[in-house]
Structure formats: structure tokens, C-alpha cells
Amino acid sequence: MRYWLLEYLRQSFTTELPWTSCGNTWNTNSCIVSHKLLSSSTNGSQWNSIGNFSNYTDNADVSAEEEFWQNNILSMTDGIGEVGYLRWRLVIWGIVLKIIVIICLLKSVKTLGKVMLFSTFLPPLIGLAMLIQSFTQTGAKDGLLFLITPDFNKLSDSKVWMEATFMAFYSLGPGWGGVMMMGSHMKFHTNCLRNVLLAIFGDVFVSIFSSVVLFSVIGVMASEIGVPVEDVIQSGMSVGLVGYSRALAYLPASYIWAVIFFFAVITVGLDAQVVCTETVVSFLEGFGVRLGRHRHLLLVLLISIFTLLLNLPFCTQSGPYMFQLVDWYLPTWSVVVIALLEVIAIMWFYDTGEWFN
């Protein structure tokens, strides 16, 4: 996922964003600019979904942003059984990210703490700038009203609550090991309950704030196109990226906002990768005494090389299918079960039943 975001960032350094127009090498005869496509009354009948990756019929008009995602960023084969060729540009991005991770972990948590301060406060600041900019345009109010207007039919859908549970585990991070790893470096008498509450309320605030920023920008886009907000919004991971890139095109100096936005998103993803790597390194350090005084750096190097090799299949043309398979079946129910077992194990080991007597 981060490799695709880096491709978006790389191709944002141009005054005319490449996903806003047709006539490029990756476009087909079905390509049409999003203004005309979303203004069409038949737009809703042209889309279908396979997994989280949107698909379309050959005879349907397809937005320029969608073709940029499908044919340029993903460049997929017809199925997971057809691997295709290795996309070396994605491999290079993987090497670049691993080098950044190694640099961030040179001094373990001392460096990691500074990285997290930067990656924590940068995205909200950028989001605030985008929010202020969207409020100067017409349509931001409509997007916010769509956000806060409840749909009780959706609230009765169990799938919505399942997705909300998975998203809570994604954003808060229980069950991944990173929270316990960072907590193990705190002072013994630290008020853990206070820190947990601060983390939860901070996560909720950032989530709500991010939604406000997103829907205000979508409202501006809907006003520019002249369609209702609900006709602009799609669902799914891939269509989410398409929607973001499309919304950025409707802001003044869109290429500047695109660079800032994708840089902020990559920073958040890099933060998670650094924490996960440090978690594995902290676990293995106890078994790597023979590696000497530089065992932390050696373990970081070995783990980075090993994970880079594991990521190579995702850099092929069938990589998006593999990513979809792993993303849905590994970090969803498994993390919920792992977190539940961790709670049971801790309560069993420390005999916390006495606390409630």
C-alpha cells in the first residue's frame, strides 16, 4: 500500500496532475474526465465491485482517476494465478522505505520517539490547512451535513459494526504488540490508565477531525461538479484512493495539496512500519546476546532485508490480489482473537480477580 502511495507522491510533482486528464499512455477509449462522468445520470449503473478493487465493463465510461489507479498504479493481471512481471519501481520504493526504517531505529526508542512526534502532529496540521481552504469554497457545508446526518438503515447492518470494530483495532493498535513494546519503555510508576484514556480520546478526535476534512473537501467537489454529495462518494480501499485523488483536483493549486496530502499519509504508514519493526526487534534482542553490542542494529538490518524479500510478491502485477487476500483474512478477526487472548492471559497470570473483590 505504501508503495502505491509513493507512486502517487512521485507523480504529483507536476503542475497538471496526471490522473485528471485522458490521453495518457495508460488511458483507454473509455476514459472520461470525472466532471463529465459524475454529471452523467447513468453514473451509478456503471460501477461494480470485485473485492475492494473497483472494476468496470468495457462499454462503460471510466473516470481518468480510475484508469490512472487501475492501469498505472496497479497495472494488474487478469487474476492472482497470473503473476506477471516484477515491477522494479515498487521494489525500489520498498528499498527506500527500509532504509528510512533503519535510520529511524538507529538508536531504538530514542530515535523512534522523535519520529512519532513528527508523524503524529504533521497530518492533523495538514488536515487543518485543507479544512480552512475548503471552508473558503462553496459546498463544504453540504459535505459536513452529509457526514453528520445519520442513516439508521446502515446502523442496523451488522457488517457496518464489524467494519467499525476492525477499524478500531487498526487505529488503536491493540494485539499488534507495538503498544506493549512502547509501554515497556515507560517508567514503572507511570499512570497507565491515564495514558490509555488519552490515547483513546486522541484517536477518536483525530478520526472525527479527518472525517470532517474529507467530507468538507468532497462537498466542495460535489458543488463544483453540480451533483449531490452521495453521488461522489464510493466505498472500498481502492475507490477511496481514487476519491481522494479526485477531491484534491478540485482544490486551488491542486498539485501542491496532492504532494502535501500523500506525504502526510505516507508518514503515518511509515510510522506504523517503524513501530512494528521495533516490536519484532525488541522481542528478538533477548535471544541475540551473541550478536554483541551492536545486536540491535544487526537485527534491524536482518529483519528489514527479510521483510523486503517477503514483500516482493506484492511488487508483481498480481500483487494487488495478494494484498487484498492478506488484508482481509490476516489482520481482521485474527487480531481481535489475539487481543482477547492477551487480555485473558494477563488476567490469568496476574490473578486480577482479586482486584474486583
Image: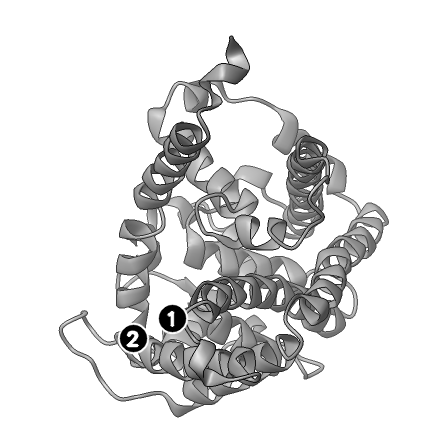
Give the label on residue 255, or none.
Answer: none
Q: Position of residue 260 (x, y in %)?
A: 72, 69
| Residue type marked 1 | Gln
| Residue type marked 2 | Met
Horizontal arrangement in the rendering, residue 349 relative to residue 182 (left or right):
left
Horizontal arrangement in the rendering, residue 52 relative to residue 281 (left or right):
left
Q: Which of 205 and 60 is in front in this view?
A: 205
Image-quadrant location for residue 353: top left
Image-quadrant location for residue 156: top left
Q: In which quarter of the image is the N terminus?
A: bottom left
Disc 2 designates what residue?
76
Considering the numbered disc 1 on the image, is that residue within a helix, a strand or a loop?
Answer: helix
Q: Are marks 1 and 2 in contact (CB under 8 Å)?
A: yes
Q: Which residue is depicted at the point 72% across and 39% down?
A: 189
Q: Which residue is depicted at the point 67% across and 46% down?
A: 210
Q: Which of 279 and 25 is in front in this view?
A: 279
Disc 1 designates what residue?
70
Q: Position of residue 321 (x, y in %)?
A: 27, 66
Q: Considering only vertical position in the picture, is 27 above or below 187?
A: below
Horizontal arrangement in the rendering, residue 39 relative to residue 91 (left or right):
right
